[in-house]
């Protein structure tokens, strides 16, 4: 299973009183919060839809229906963790996320780095693989009137791959499956490599396509 898949996701939640405002797993001080069955983390919901969409796995309503009491007040990062596990179980890894949050108020800039950190930690990737941008809607429409906050995930590309454990292996290869088998066949513990698409987009464990320079990782 190789290749790069792209997904997109969108979500909007209504703002209301007596609710926390949680975006990307970060609680943000504000006089209003987002309404919803779970914690109503609109950014994390849209990311989940983008990731599921990239593999044509449906949407979050299918996995976490709002009619199911077990998801009442749910921490959306826990749900994202489950979506990530689903993706990984099929041999895929999140490559990067790019997102836009549309909110008239409050100003989100001071919280962006914390959101990137929390999302990256949840997905097991680096913060520089998670882009979070914020914009207002110039007072237009429901987000502009502060009736809600929306999130748009422009891209949720993930690359096929998986994790193999073995000794460093050097030599030319032109088939990631062959390469993975050779690394695995060497049988040693403690050295691992992420194998992915040809070209190794976003692959932290390799330095070149000819198979040299495998790094030790946990
Ligand atoms: Mg939602």
Image: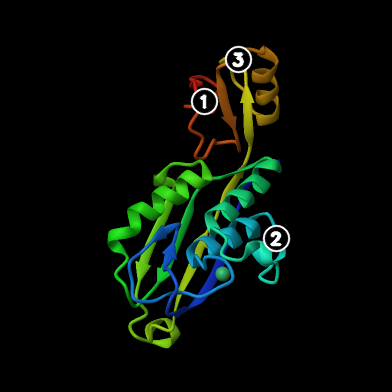
Marker disc for residue 218: 1
Q: CA distance from mark 3 to mark 1?
A: 10 Å
Marker disc for residue 175: none
Q: Are marks 2 and 1 in contact (CB under 8 Å)?
A: no
Residue 4 lies, with reference to residue 172, above or below; the image says below
Category of crowding for the residue at label 1, using alpha-carbon neighbours closer than 10 angstroms: few (below 14), some (14–19), many (at least 20): few
For mark 3, give the secondary structure. loop
Report the mark closest to the observer, 3 or 2: 2
Category of crowding for the residue at label 3, using alpha-carbon neighbours closer than 10 angstroms: few (below 14), some (14–19), many (at least 20): few
Category of crowding for the residue at label 2, using alpha-carbon neighbours closer than 10 angstroms: few (below 14), some (14–19), many (at least 20): few
Q: Who comes first in sequence, dot 2 or dot 1?
A: 2
Q: Residue drawn 43% across and 84% down?
A: 147
Residue pointed to by mark 3: 189
Of 66 and 171, the residue lying toward us: 66
The reply to whether residue 117 is visible in this rendering is yes
Q: Who comes first in sequence, dot 3 or dot 1?
A: 3
For mark 1, give the secondary structure. loop
Residue pointed to by mark 2: 63
Quarter that holds the N terminus? top right
Q: Quadrant of residue 72?
A: bottom right
- In the rendered image, residue 46, in percent from the top left (x then y), is placed at 54, 64
Q: CA distance from mark 2 to mark 1?
A: 30 Å
Q: Who comes first in sequence, dot 3 or dot 2?
A: 2
- In the rendered image, residue 59, in percent from the top left (x then y), is placed at 67, 64
Q: Residue drawn 64% across and 57% down?
A: 52
């Amino acid at each position: 299973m190789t290749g790069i898949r792209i997904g997109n996701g969108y979500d909007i939640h209504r703002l209301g009183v007596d609710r926390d405002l949680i975006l990307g797993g970060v609680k943000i001080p504000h006089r209003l919060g987002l309404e919803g069955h779970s914690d109503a983390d609109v950014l994390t919901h849209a990311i989940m839809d983008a990731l599921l969409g990239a593999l044509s796995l449906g949407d979050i309503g299918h996995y976490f229906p709002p009619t199911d009491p077990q998801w009442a007040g749910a921490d959306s990062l826990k749900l994202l963790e489950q979506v990530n596990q689903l993706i990984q179980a099929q041999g895929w890894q999140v490559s990067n996320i790019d997102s836009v949050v549309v909110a008239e108020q409050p100003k989100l800039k001071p919280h962006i780095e914390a959101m990137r950190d929390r999302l990256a930690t949840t997905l097991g990737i680096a913060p520089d693989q998670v882009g979070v941008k914020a914009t207002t809607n110039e007072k237009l429409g429901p987000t502009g009137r502060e009736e809600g906050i929306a999130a748009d995930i422009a891209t949720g590309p993930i690359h096929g791959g998986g994790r193999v454990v073995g000794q460093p292996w050097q030599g030319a290869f032109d088939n990631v499956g062959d390469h993975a088998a050779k690394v695995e066949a060497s049988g040693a513990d403690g050295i691992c490599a992420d194998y992915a698409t040809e070209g190794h987009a976003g692959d932290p464990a390799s330095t070149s396509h000819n198979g040299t320079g495998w790094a030790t990782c946990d």
